Amino acid sequence: AQKVTQAQTEISVVEKEDVTLDCVYETRDTTYYLFWYKQPPSGELVFLIRRNSFDEQNEISGRYSWNFQKSTSSFNFTITASQVVDSAVYFCALSQDTGRRALTFGSGTRLQVQP
Amino acid sequence: ETGVTQSPTHLIKTRGQQVTLRCSSQSGHNTVSWYQQALGQGPQFIFQYYREEENGRGNFPPRFSGLQFPNYSSELNVNALELDDSALYLCASSLAKGQGRHGELFFGEGSRLTVL
């Protein structure tokens, strides 16, 4: 069985602060994929990043960075110099490497960035 | 490029009724997945369709059923509605395994169902 835990229900920061969203996962598979999705108030989930289980390199994309640590089963997401537009619910998700592309989502972290 | 569109955006039903939700997938995408998102929770996988056949199912009872049409659009049907079916229903389109990036789903804005 797969499980994704996002222990932080809600985080509030002031604009320009850095913020890290935590994600811990459980799986028995040796090959799997991890994701982060953003859900703005409009409702649709927006893909941010995918990482496969064999690639532990950290990734940076603009103000976003991701830290994948297999040893601790964590895939954390950091926003540097947060902006009001970053306010949304962020979901971490896990998928097996099978033909069926079902994602197991965490319960999400609501990020509020205050001006 | 046309994105994923869902209809209706909001609807209210009563217990025991049936509902049909519709989804038009992103242009060129041949796989459609449906997710249920209860308030304050993460989305839960209902099922996936590829080439008009169900290609995987989550932990949902048979009263949740679906269809995929030749143009890859899809429907989600829920019979005998229960109060706990109140949720945001999200449709996501993607390419099949080997045709695109695994897990990169393109979501619609959802249909919010309220069951009274």
Image (tube, coloured by chain):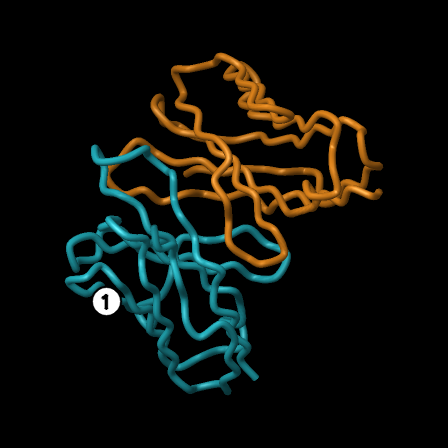
Chain colours: A orange, B cyan
Disc 1 secondary structure class: strand
Q: Position of residue A84 (x, y in %)?
A: 75, 42
The x and y percentages for residue A113 are: 78, 42
B71 lies left or right of A63: left
The residue lying at 40 percent from left, 48 percent from top is B106
Left or right: where A45 falls relative to B7: right
The chain that hosts pointer 1 is B
Foreground residue among A100 and A59: A59
Residue at 38 percent of width and 53 percent of height: B92
Q: Quadrant of residue A86?
A: top right
Q: Residue at x 55, y 77 (%)?
A: B114
Question: Left or right: B30 with respect to B6?
Answer: left
| Residue A104 coordinates in the image, percent (x, y) | 45, 43
- Callout 1, which amino acid? Leu
In this rendering, position of residue B16 left or right of residue A79? left
Q: Which residue is mark 1?
A: B67
The tally of labels here is 1
In the picture shown, does residue B43 fall above or below A90?
Answer: below
Quadrant in the picture for the N terminus of chain A? top left
**Rendered view: B2 above or below A53:** below
In which quadrant of the rendered image does the C terminus of chain A lie?
A: top right
Residue at the image point whose x is 64% and y is 25% from the top: A63
